[in-house]
Image: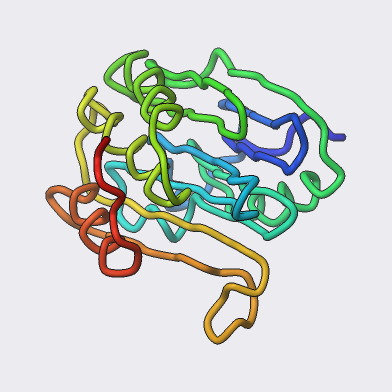
Amino acid sequence: MPRRIGLFSVGVLLLPMAFTWLARLPAPSAPGEIEVNTFSIVAYDPERKEWGVAVASKYLAVGNAVPFARANVGAVATQAAVNVAHGPNGLDLLAKGKVAAFTGSGCTAYAGHKMGENYACQGNILAGEAVINDMAKAFEDSKGPLAWRMMAALEAADKAGGDKRGKQSAAILVVRDKFGPNGIGDRFLDLRVDDHKEPIPELARILSLRIKRPKAT
């Protein structure tokens, strides 16, 4: 499998393995080149056969650039000097699937990732390492639908300081085979908050309109 799947991309497979890539690689300069420096989680629910991505950032409409997922294949988040081609290309590579993890030294601090069973958390330009660690713990400790477990991870990251530049947008994507609108396709959830003072609470509010939030235990 090619080593350079993306400038910052992540995937999780239906296998007892995951793929993570967090690297700030040289990219050609271009007019209007943008960066999506943020925090995200990609995850898999083996019981419901769902794959998902949840992401938040101080960037307008992050859901339009970062999350990609394909039922029965995996999920990808492409960040930093964002290249949306890494989404579908990464999914194609995930279909062949192997395990790998790497964090490039050129990422803007704090940058890092943490992998666990059926998930990976990652980000850069973060308030600190606690953002990643708290995301991971929240996901591991939570119960219920995948969307709400990923939501818990975003909320924990936000509480730990999140993107140190501030807040603007958030998104959640969950795919499941034949669970698209009217049973067509796999796009079960595709919810976005493009510009808001508190994008993560707003995303949780919207998600609750679709799926009831599990009661805290």
Q: How many marks do you count on the picture?
A: 0
* Image quadrant in which you'd find residue 153: top left
**Position above or below: 91 against 180:** above
In the image, taking residue 70 as reference, residue 3 lies left or right, namely right
Closer to the camera, 128 or 24?
A: 128
In the image, taking residue 213 as reference, residue 78 lies left or right, namely right
**Position above or below: 129 against 24:** above
Closer to the camera, 195 or 135?
A: 135
Question: Percent from the top left, x then y, of residue 89?
Answer: 74, 52
Question: Percent from the top left, x then y, of residue 155?
Answer: 27, 37
* Image quadrant in which you'd find residue 64: bottom left
Q: Residue at x 36, y 28 (%)?
A: 138
Q: Residue at x 61, y 34 (%)?
A: 118
**Position above or below: 184 against 153:** below
View extreme (left): residue: 197
Question: Percent from the top left, x then y, of residue 28?
Answer: 61, 40
Image quadrant occupied by the C terminus: top left
Question: Percent from the top left, x then y, of residue 82?
Answer: 52, 45
Q: Residue at x 84, y 34 (%)?
A: 2
Q: How is the image coloured?
A: rainbow
